Image (spheres, rainbow, N blue to C red):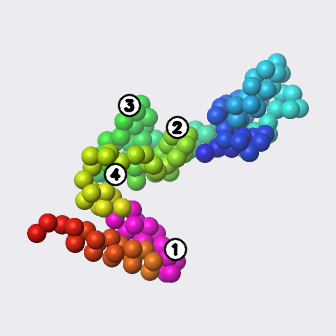
Amino acid sequence: MKKCGRCSKPAVLHITEIREGDVQALHLCETCAKDYLSTSAPEASESPEPAEPVTKTQFADVSAEADEQVCPNCGISFKEFRSQGRLGCAHDYVAFQDELLPLLENIHGEVQHVGKVPKRAPDASQFQFRLVKLRNRLRVAVDDELYEEAARLRDEIQQLESQMGSKQPE
């Protein structure tokens, strides 16, 4: 989540200004945004420090480069996703990861689902979900060479698998 340009609160207002041919992004929290919008002259000395200036050509190059990306599975381009607002398949999250993560974080404040699990969901599906999460964490720990953490996760996975095995009807 972006932080305010004036203070450390989460930014809720994102302004893109074009001044003298330069594109400048401002990220403001609710309080700072009220102050910024209430001043008649945005160039006042109290205006927040803008993020690093981006020239028009740099912005166009990054945008065009992202638009050209195509999912190898379903063939949808990032440009098509932007125009339709829908992804073509689950693999698009991986194919467009660099562009989607900031977008999802801006919209939801998180990049990982942290919602509730339905109460009617069977225990087996909850076990499976937890098992998948643990295996992903194990893979990351091994990739980062955190072997103590990987061993702990491996043991937790084995324990969960043995619990699943003992609860299954014969």
**Three-letter amino acid code at the position of disc 1:** Asp
- The stretch in magenta equals 131-150
Residue placed under numbered mark 2 in the picture: 107
Is label 1 or label 3 in front?
A: 1
Q: CA distance from mark 1 to mark 3?
A: 37 Å
Please give the name of the residue rendered at 40% of the width and 37% of the height, measured from the top-left corner: 81
Name the amino acid type tagged 3. Gln
Q: CA distance from mark 3 to mark 2?
A: 17 Å
- Front residue of this view, candidates 27 and 133: 133
Going from N to C along the chain, the mark reached first, 1 or 4, is 4
User: Mark 2 touching mark 4, by CB under 8 A?
Assistant: no
The residue type indicated by label 4 comes to His
Instruction: Using the numbered discs, state the Cα–Cα distance from disc 1 to disc 4 in whole angstroms.
Output: 24 Å
Residue placed at 40% from the left, 33% from the top?
85
Q: Position of residue 21 (x, y in %)?
A: 73, 31
Judge whether residue 9 is colored magenta.
Answer: no
Residue sitting at x 70%, y 35%: 29
Which residue, given by chain and number where applicable, does mark 1 sit on?
Answer: 144
The mark nearer the N terminus, 2 or 1, is: 2
Secondary structure type for disc 2: helix
* Disc sitting over residue 91 in the figure: 4
Q: Position of residue 120 (x, y in %)?
A: 27, 46
Q: Residues within 10 Å of mark 3 (few under 14, many from 20)?
A: few
The residue lying toward the viewer, choosing from 156 and 9, is 156
